């Protein structure tokens, strides 16, 4: 029987900071302690923000920290066919539909519904605070949908969450870390809290949710160790795993490194960037101390 398989999966849309260092080091340390393997994945589906120099810096920063990973590195932009095949399976189940509204149009639709509701209650939001998609495109006929696509209209392919959740799936996951409010052990998944999530766009044939689930399965990932900001995203991932017949890894969500205002670190913050810290004389041991792993 093979040992546990971990992965670190950064996006090359900026330079790594202390939050990335914490996650990478935890994965590396756990893989080594458990006699497992550590894989590196480059999540570069966003061609408008991802840049080669950021990817090169990822390899440089990780090597400087003393982190070793198995080759080859999986780059998501080289595997769009894998994600399209999975999307086709979901479409065959009748669980995908195109939405044509822009972000501004969705905001206007939600504002209109909030204004005319009997209690004028706030529109429901997902766990990240974004307004749920109102689902207006589901009422379009197949002919009208096809007409708009052939006319070149921008669109996003969305998961029909109500239809997906109506399939009688009993979803949960084993949490060996803890969520934002101390959730651990068997955690009930709540994918409906995300509404009709985007699975792909006209210009990008996948999404974070879809590609991460497919990659974890194809790479044989058994241990997903990542920050608590992705805790409730696991609900969507468990749903997609069940719908596509994919294996379920064990999840371990860890604490985040926060800035002085209590917010998650941003790649735009040079004060916590690994390149800046290294240039200022910091050592790998200093980084371990700064992230609380000494």
Image (cartoon, grey):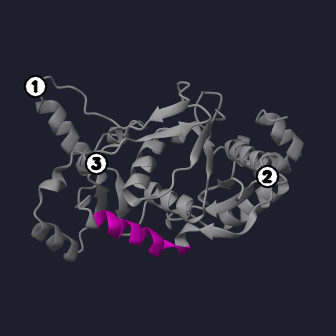
Q: Circle 2: is it few (<14), some (14-19), or many (20+) Cα within 10 Å? A: few
Furthest residue in direction front, as rendered: 1
Mark 1, residue position:
118
Residue 15 seen from this side: no
13 lies left or right of 20: left
Residue 26 lies, with reference to residue 201, above or below; the image says above
Please say whether residue 117 is one of the residues in the magenta stretch.
no
Residue 143 lies, with reference to residue 252, above or below; the image says: below
Whether residue 118 appears in this view of the structure is: yes
Q: Position of residue 36 (x, y in %)?
A: 75, 54
- Where does the image place residue 54, in percent across and percent down from the top left? 66, 62
The residue wearing badge 2 is 35
What residue is at 69 percent from the left and 45 percent from the top? Answer: 23
> Can you identify the residue that label 3 sits on?
161
**The quarter of the displayed image where residue 145 is located:** bottom left
Task: Tell whether 117 sits left or right of 212.
Answer: left
């Amino acid at each position: 029987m093979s040992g546990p398989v971990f992965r670190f999966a950064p996006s090359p849309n900026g330079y790594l900071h202390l939050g990335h260092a914490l996650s990478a080091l935890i994965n590396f340390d756990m893989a080594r302690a458990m006699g497992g393997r550590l894989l590196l994945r480059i999540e570069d589906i966003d061609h408008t923000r991802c840049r080669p120099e950021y990817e090169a810096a990822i390899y440089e920063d990780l090597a400087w920290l003393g982190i070793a990973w198995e080759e080859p590195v999986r780059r998501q932009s080289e595997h769009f066919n894998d994600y399209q095949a999975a999307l086709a399976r979901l479409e065959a189940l009748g669980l995908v539909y195109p939405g044509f509204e822009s972000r501004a149009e969705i905001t206007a639709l939600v504002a209109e519904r909030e204004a005319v509701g009997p209690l004028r209650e706030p529109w429901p939001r997902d766990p990240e605070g974004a307004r749920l998609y109102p689902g207006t495109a589901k009422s379009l006929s197949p002919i009208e949908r096809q007409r708009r696509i052939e006319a070149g209209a921008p669109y996003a392919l969305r998961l029909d969450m109500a239809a997906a959740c109506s399939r009688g799936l009993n979803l949960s996951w084993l949490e060996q870390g803890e969520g934002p409010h101390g959730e651990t052990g068997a955690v009930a998944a709540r994918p409906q809290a995300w509404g009709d999530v985007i699975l792909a766009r006209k210009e990008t044939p996948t999404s974070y949710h879809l590609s991460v689930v497919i990659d974890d399965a194809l790479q044989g990932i058994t241990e997903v160790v990542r920050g608590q900001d992705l805790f409730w995203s696991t609900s969507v991932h468990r749903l997609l795993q069940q719908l596509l017949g994919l294996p379920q890894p064990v999840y371990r969500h860890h604490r985040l490194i926060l800035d002085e205002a209590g917010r998650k670190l941003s790649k735009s913050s040079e004060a916590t960037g690994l390149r800046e810290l290294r240039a200022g004389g910091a050592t790998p041991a200093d980084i371990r101390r700064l992230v609380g792993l000494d």
